[in-house]
Image: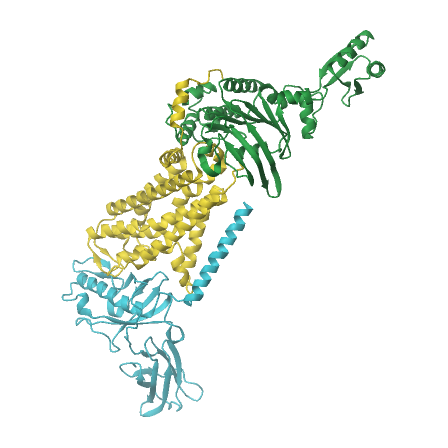
C-alpha cells in the first residue's frame, strides 16, 4: 500500500510536470477568445430572435434578414479579451424594421463564458423583452432571446472580425449635490465599446455656462466631471450636453434638478 | 517431453525479497512417479520454492523445469499436467463449490469430460457443492482445493502443507488419498513441517533450512543419519534409576528432564537392557515413551528448529 | 474422501490429447460468470435503469427549470433537452463511478479473496486473464452506459415529450433529428468512458485494493473537472480526461463542429493505452505472494 501511494505521488508529479510544460509551451492561452465569440453570438442570436419572432407572429424575420454583428469585450479596457469569465459583454447590432436599434446602434448582451466554450447570454429587456412572453395563441411561454445557452467551436476561426462599436457614455448622477462654493460635479460611465469615451461635457444653468470639461474615460470605466463656475443662486436645474469625438453620448442633453 | 525427463528439476534457484534471501541456490530433482517431500520449519522457503514452480513468483536466478518445460520458454504450458495448491486453497466466496470448480475447469482449457461430480465425490463434498464457499469450513475448503487439483487429472500433484488445519481424521484421509494417488502413478511433491508426515509417504526428501538445502536424499539415507532416540522415563525412584544407569549402562545417557521424570538416550538395545535392569532392581517403571522419532530428532538437528517439549504427542498436526 | 480416483486409461488418453491452454474465450466466459454472480454488478445495472427514471420524473415536476446547467432551461418542457441535461450531469459525476465499480474491483478482488494463486495455477496465462478482465470491465461499462442512455432517453421522451429542440446555436432541431443527435451525444461518452475504465483497471492492478480502485478514478475525475473549469490554465484542458465528456456540444451546434470530438478520442486513446500498458506490465511482473 505504501508502495502504491509513493507511485501515485510520482505519477501526479509527472502529470503536473507535463501540464506545466504544456502551459509554458502554449503561454497558458485559452480557446475562449473575442473573435470566436464575435462569430458565435450573432449566429445564435439570429436563431433565437427568429424563434421569438415566430412566437410573436412577426412576419418576415429570418436569420438571414437580421444581419447581426457583434463586438465582444472582457472586463473593459483593463483586461485582455481572452479566457472564460462572467464579465464578457457583447454589443450586438441587427436589423429588424419592426424593432429598430437605439441611437447608439446596438444592444448590450452580457455573457458568462465557461472554459469549455459554452456560454449563457442575457439580452437587454429593452430590446428583446422579458423572460416570458405571450405568444400568438395567448400562452405565456419562455422568451427564447431573453436568456439563452450556446456553445462555440473552440477550434473555430480566430482571426479578428473587425467589428467595432463606439462606447456609450452615460451620466449616472441622478441628483446634484453642490459643494460649499456651489460647484457641481457629475459622474459619467463609459460603456463597452472600442476606444473609450473622449470629448467634452458642457454644463449650463439657465443662461449661465458652468464650464466645459474634457472627458477622457476608458471603456467600462467611470469618471467624475467637476465644473469650475459656481451655480448661481436660485437655479432650478442644470443641463449637461456631451460632445464626443470617441463614443456616443446621450441623445438628448441631460437635465438634473438642483436641491432645494 | 523427452523420455526419462524429471518431473521437476530445480537448478540453482535463488529468490530474494527486500534484501532477505528466501530461497538460496536450491537444486533438486523429482523423478516421475515418486512422492517427494520438502521438509522444513515455517519460513524455510518451501512455499516460495513451490510458488516459483507454479510461476507465481519469478526466481532471481536459476531455472525450474517441470516435465522439461520452463516458464521462460513455455509460459503457462509449463503447468500442463500439474495441479496443486499453495498454502490454504482460496476460492470465490460468492460462488458455490460447484460453480468454483466449473469456472476453474474453464480455465484449464481442456476438452475433458466433466469430472466435477466425480472429484466432488472423491473429496466427499457431495451434498454441499451447491452451497456458497463463503460458508465452508476450513477443512471443506481444503478438500475443495484437492478437488480443484484433481479436476486437472494431473501427472504431478503439488501440495503445500496439505495437513495444515485439518483434524486428525482429515489428516488420515488426506494421507490415504495421497498414497492412493501415488500408487496410481501420480508424481507428488509435498511440503510439510512434520517429519512424520513426510516419513510416512515420501520416497525422497529435501530438508530446507533458512532458504537452502540442509539435506537431500532418500528416507533410508535419512534413517541411517538419525541420532539415537530419546525416551521419557517415569519411575518410582528417579534417583536410584539414574544411579543404575550411570553404574551399569555407560553406553546410554540418563539425566533428569526439566519437565520431571528422566530422559534416557542411547541405542535401542542399550535402552532395552537398561529397562530390564530397572525392573530387576525393583524400581517401579511407570512410563516409557519416545520423546520424538529418530527422524524428528534429525530434522530438528538439521534445521536448528526450536525443539518441542519432550512430552509432545507424536501424532503431528493436531494441535494447530 | 473415500471414493476411488479416476485412473482409467481412457481418461488419461483423453487428457493427453486435450491438454492445452485456456483460450481468451474461456477466460472471458469465466470472468463474465463471476461478474454475473456478484450482487454489486447486478445492482448497478438496475440502478442505471431506474435512477434516470426517478431523476427525469422529479426534475420534470419542478416548477422552475434548472437553468444553470446546459439544456436545463428547456428540460421541463422538452424531452430531448431533459435527456441532454441528464447526460451533462451523468458525464460529470456518474460515469467514472459507474465503470469504476466493476473495473476498479476486477483485479483487486483477486487480491482480496487471495484467488490469484487459484486461477494462475490453472492453464491460463497472466496475459490472457488480464485481457479477459479488461474486456469484461469494458463490456460492463458499455452495457451500463447503454442502459443509462436508453432509460434516460425513453423516460424523457415519454414523460416530458418530443417537442422540437433548441440547439446550442439557438437553431430549432426537428424531433426526428433531435432523437438521433441525443443518441449520438450519449454515444460520444464511449471514448472517455473506456479511458476511465482503463484508469480504474490500472488503479485496481496497482493498488490491489478495491476501495482505491473504485474511488481513485472518481476522485481523479473530480479533480480534472475542477482543474478543467479553472480559468488561466486552460492549456491543460485537452490533456484532461473529463474534457471529452463535453465534446458532444459540437453535435448540437449549427454548423456542427467535431474538433473537440476528435481531440477527445485522441486524449481518451492515449489515457487508455498508457493505463492498460502500465497495468499489464505491473501484473505481468508481479510476484504473487499473498493468498
Which x, y percent locates residue B6? 52, 28
Residue C60 visible in the snapshot: yes
Shown in cyan, the chain is A
Shown in green, the chain is B
State the residue in front, A113 or C260.
C260
Which x, y percent locates residue A174? 35, 78
Q: Quadrant of residue C106?
A: top left
Which x, y percent locates residue A238? 33, 86
Please determine whether, in this image, residue A191 is positioned above or below residue C166.
below
State the residue in front, A126 or B227.
B227
Find the residue positioned furthest to the front.
Answer: B3
Please determine whether, in this image, residue A22 is positioned above or below residue C189.
below
Query: Which residue shows up at 31% across the image and 69% down it?
Result: A158
Please determine whether, in this image, residue B175 is positioned above or below residue A11.
above
Which x, y percent locates residue A18? 45, 59
Query: Which residue shows up at 66% across the image and 19% down it?
Result: B314
State the residue in front, B85 or C106.
B85
Residue A260 visible in the snapshot: no
Q: How many marks?
A: 0
Find the residue positioned furthest to the left.
Answer: A59
* Colour mapping: by chain
Query: Chain C appears what colour?
Result: yellow
Question: In the figure, is residue B140 to the left or right of A145?
Answer: right
Amino acid at each position: 500500500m505504501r508502495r502504491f501511494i509513493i507511485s501515485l505521488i510520482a505519477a501526479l508529479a509527472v502529470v503536473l510536470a507535463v501540464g506545466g510544460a504544456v502551459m509554458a509551451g502554449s503561454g497558458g492561452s485559452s480557446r475562449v477568445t473575442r473573435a470566436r465569440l464575435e462569430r458565435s453570438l450573432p449566429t445564435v442570436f439570429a436563431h433565437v430572435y427568429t424563434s421569438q419572432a415566430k412566437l410573436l407572429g412577426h412576419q418576415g424575420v429570418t436569420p438571414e434578414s437580421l444581419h447581426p454583428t457583434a463586438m465582444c469585450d472582457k472586463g473593459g479596457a483593463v483586461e485582455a479579451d481572452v479566457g472564460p469569465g462572467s464579465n464578457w459583454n457583447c454589443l450586438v447590432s441587427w436589423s429588424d424594421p419592426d424593432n429598430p436599434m437605439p441611437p447608439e446602434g446596438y444592444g448590450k448582451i452580457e455573457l458568462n463564458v465557461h472554459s469549455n466554450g459554452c456560454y449563457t447570454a442575457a439580452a437587454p429587456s429593452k430590446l428583446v423583452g422579458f423572460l416570458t412572453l405571450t405568444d400568438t395563441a395567448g400562452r405565456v411561454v419562455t422568451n427564447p432571446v431573453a436568456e439563452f445557452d450556446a456553445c462555440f467551436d473552440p477550434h473555430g476561426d480566430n482571426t479578428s472580425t473587425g467589428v467595432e462599436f463606439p462606447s456609450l457614455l452615460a451620466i449616472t448622477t441622478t441628483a446634484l449635490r453642490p459643494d460649499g462654493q456651489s460647484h457641481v460635479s457629475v459622474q459619467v460611465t463609459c460603456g463597452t465599446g472600442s476606444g473609450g469615451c473622449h470629448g467634452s461635457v458642457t454644463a449650463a444653468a439657465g443662461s449661465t455656462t458652468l464650464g466645459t470639461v474634457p472627458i477622457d474615460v476608458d471603456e467600462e470605466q467611470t469618471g467624475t466631471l467637476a465644473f469650475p463656475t459656481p451655480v448661481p443662486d436660485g437655479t432650478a436645474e442644470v443641463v449637461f450636453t456631451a460632445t464626443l469625438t470617441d463614443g456616443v453620448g446621450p441623445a438628448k442633453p441631460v437635465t438634473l434638478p438642483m436641491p432645494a | 517431453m523427452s523420455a526419462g525427463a524429471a518431473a521437476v528439476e530445480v537448478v540453482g534457484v535463488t529468490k530474494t525479497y527486500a534484501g532477505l534471501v528466501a530461497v538460496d541456490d536450491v537444486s533438486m530433482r523429482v523423478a516421475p512417479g515418486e512422492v517427494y517431500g520438502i521438509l522444513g520449519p515455517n519460513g524455510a522457503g518451501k512455499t516460495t520454492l513451490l510458488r516459483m514452480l507454479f510461476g507465481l513468483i519469478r526466481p532471481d536466478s536459476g531455472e525450474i523445469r517441470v516435465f522439461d518445460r520452463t516458464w521462460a520458454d513455455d509460459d503457462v504450458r509449463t503447468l500442463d499436467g500439474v495441479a496443486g495448491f499453495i498454502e490454504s486453497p482460496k476460492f470465490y466466496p460468492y460462488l458455490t463449490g460447484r460453480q468454483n470448480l466449473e469456472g476453474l475447469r474453464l480455465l484449464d482449457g481442456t476438452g475433458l469430460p466433466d469430472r466435477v461430480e466425480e472429484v466432488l465425490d472423491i473429496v466427499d463434498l457431495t451434498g454441499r457443492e451447491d452451497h456458497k464457499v463463503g460458508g465452508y469450513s476450513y477443512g471443506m475448503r481444503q478438500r475443495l482445493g484437492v478437488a480443484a487439483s484433481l479436476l486437472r487429472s494431473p501427472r504431478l500433484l503439488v501440495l503445500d502443507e496439505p495437513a495444515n488445519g485439518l483434524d486428525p481424521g482429515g489428516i488420515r484421509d488426506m494421507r490415504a488419498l495421497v498414497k492412493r494417488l501415488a500408487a496410481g502413478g501420480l508424481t507428488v511433491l509435498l511440503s510439510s513441517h512434520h517429519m512424520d508426515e513426510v516419513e510416512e509417504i515420501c520416497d525422497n526428501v529435501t530438508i530446507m533450512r533458512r532458504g537452502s538445502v540442509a539435506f537431500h536424499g532418500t528416507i533410508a539415507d535419512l534413517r541411517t543419519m538419525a541420532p539415537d532416540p530419546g525416551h521419557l522415563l517415569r519411575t518410582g525412584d528417579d534417583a536410584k534409576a539414574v544411579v543404575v544407569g550411570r553404574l551399569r549402562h555407560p553406553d546410554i545417557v540418563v539425566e533428569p528432564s526439566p519437565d520431571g521424570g528422566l530422559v534416557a538416550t542411547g541405542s535401542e538395545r542399550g535402552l532395552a537392557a537398561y529397562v530390564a535392569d530397572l525392573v530387576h532392581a525393583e524400581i517401579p517403571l511407570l512410563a516409557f515413551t519416545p520423546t520424538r522419532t529418530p527422524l524428528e530428532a534429525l530434522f530438528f538437528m538439521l534445521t536448528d528448529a526450536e525443539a518441542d517439549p519432550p512430552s509432545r504427542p507424536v501424532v503431528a498436526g493436531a494441535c494447530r | 474422501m473415500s471414493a476411488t480416483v479416476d485412473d482409467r486409461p481412457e481418461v488419461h488418453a483423453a487428457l493427453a490429447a486435450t491438454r492445452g491452454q485456456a483460450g481468451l474465450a474461456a477466460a472471458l466466459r469465466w470472468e463474465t460468470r463471476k461478474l454475473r454472480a456478484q450482487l454489486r454488478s447486478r445492482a448497478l445495472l438496475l440502478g442505471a435503469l431506474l435512477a434516470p427514471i426517478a431523476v427525469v420524473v422529479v426534475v420534470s415536476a419542478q416548477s422552475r427549470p434548472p437553468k444553470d446547467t446546459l439544456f436545463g432551461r428547456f428540460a421541463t418542457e422538452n424531452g430531448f433537452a431533459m435527456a441532454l441535461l441528464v447526460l451533462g450531469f451523468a458525464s460529470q459525476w456518474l460515469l467514472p463511478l459507474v465503470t469504476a465499480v466493476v473495473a476498479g474491483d476486477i483485479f483487486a478482488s483477486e487480491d482480496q479473496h487471495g484467488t490469484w494463486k487459484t486461477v494462475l495455477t490453472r492453464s491460463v496465462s497472466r496475459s490472457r486473464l488480464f485481457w479477459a478482465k479488461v474486456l469484461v470491465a469494458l463490456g460492463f461499462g458499455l452495457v451500463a452506459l447503454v442502459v443509462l442512455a436508453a432509460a434516460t432517453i425513453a423516460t424523457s421522451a415519454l414523460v416530458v415529450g418530443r417537442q422540437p429542440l433548441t440547439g446550442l446555436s439557438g437553431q430549432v432541431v426537428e424531433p426526428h433529428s433531435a432523437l438521433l443527435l441525443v443518441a449520438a451525444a450519449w454515444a460520444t461518452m464511449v471514448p472517455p468512458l473506456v479511458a476511465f475504465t482503463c484508469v480504474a483497471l490500472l488503479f485496481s492492478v496497482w493498488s490491489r485494493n478495491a476501495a482505491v480502485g473504485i474511488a481513485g478514478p472518481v476522485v481523479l475525475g473530480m479533480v480534472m473537472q475542477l482543474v478543467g473549469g479553472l480559468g488561466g490554465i486552460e492549456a491543460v484542458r485537452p490533456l484532461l480526461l473529463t474534457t471529452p465528456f463535453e465534446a458532444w456540444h459540437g453535435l448540437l451546434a449549427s454548423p456542427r463542429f467535431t474538433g473537440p470530438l476528435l481531440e477527445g478520442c485522441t486524449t481518451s486513446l492515449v489515457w487508455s493505452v498508457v493505463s492498460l500498458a502500465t497495468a499489464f506490465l505491473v501484473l505481468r511482473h508481479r510476484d504473487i505472494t499473498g493468498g
